[in-house]
Amino acid sequence: MDFWDKIAGFYDLAEAVNGKVYGEMLSITARLVPKGARVLDCAAGTGALSFAAAKRVKSVLCTDLSEKMLKIAKIKAKTLDVTNISFDTRNIFDLKDNDETYDIVIAGNVLHLLENPAGAVKELYRVLKPNGKLLLPTFTTKNKGGKMLGLYKLIGFKPAAEYSPAEYKAMLKNCGCGRVKTKLIEGFIPCCYAVIIKG
């Protein structure tokens, strides 16, 4: 069983443990998404960032490779009566959308899991409209996270990289997709919230 399918039922609990950071991450996402936007959320897990965006937008496509994560996200959408959200299984390296389809593209807490994060960033950027925003919040776990990160690793969590905030920003800049702005959200496991605007 895939790690993310295995932990799907506990994923929201893990988010709650790092609640201060998650709360600010969701708040920033809601502020950055313009009213009426068309949004794609990749590697969305159980949909936290999708739901934050859905409050203001025309539509959100919530995607993940884990069917179990998406199943939970669908239940949450029904419970919360969120009707402007749809769901699909998608590969972040092959989105199957036309160029310049979305006003906002979100990929939260996934790039550190990938052997080729630049390839994912370029594919996300491809489907973004001109002047659109690519939102890339990611936990910066280098020398952080302690016992919780250790516990995750014991049950099969295998990040491809552990970044400091500066290293994460440098990796994104090296993708060559435009100017990268970041904000560090301090907390139990810090998050570097990165934004790239398509020129």
Image: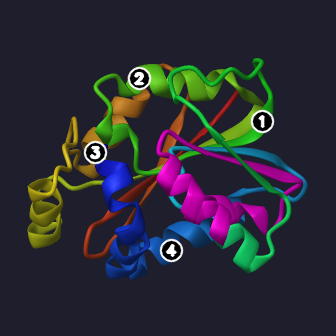
Q: Are marks 4 and 1 in contact (CB under 8 Å)?
A: no
Q: Secondary structure at mark 1?
A: strand
Tell me whether the residue at label 1 lies in contact with that at label 3, contact meaning CB atoms closer than 8 angstroms: no
Q: In the structure shown, which secondary structural element does the residue marked by tag 4 occupy?
A: helix
Residue under pointer 3: 166
- Residue 81 sits above or below residue 43 on the image: below
Q: CA distance from mark 3 to mark 4?
A: 20 Å
**Is residue 122 within the magenta segment?**
no
Mark 1 = which residue?
102
Range covered by the magenta-colored residues: 48-75
Which residue is disc 2 drawn over? 118
Which is in the foreground here, disc 3 or disc 4?
A: 4
Direction from residue 155 to residue 133 in the image, left or right: right
- Inspect the image, locate mark 1, and give the three-letter code of the amino acid beneath it: Tyr
Amino acid type at image mark 3:
Ala
Can residue 48 be seen from the camera position used here? yes
Q: Are marks 2 and 3 in contact (CB under 8 Å)?
A: no
Question: Which is more N-terminal, label 3 or label 2?
Answer: 2
On the image, the x and y values in percent for residue 40 come to 69, 42
Q: Amino acid at mark 4?
A: Glu
Residue highlighted by disc 4: 24
Mark 1 packing: few (<14 Cα in 10 Å), some, or many (20+)? Answer: many
Magenta span includes 73: yes
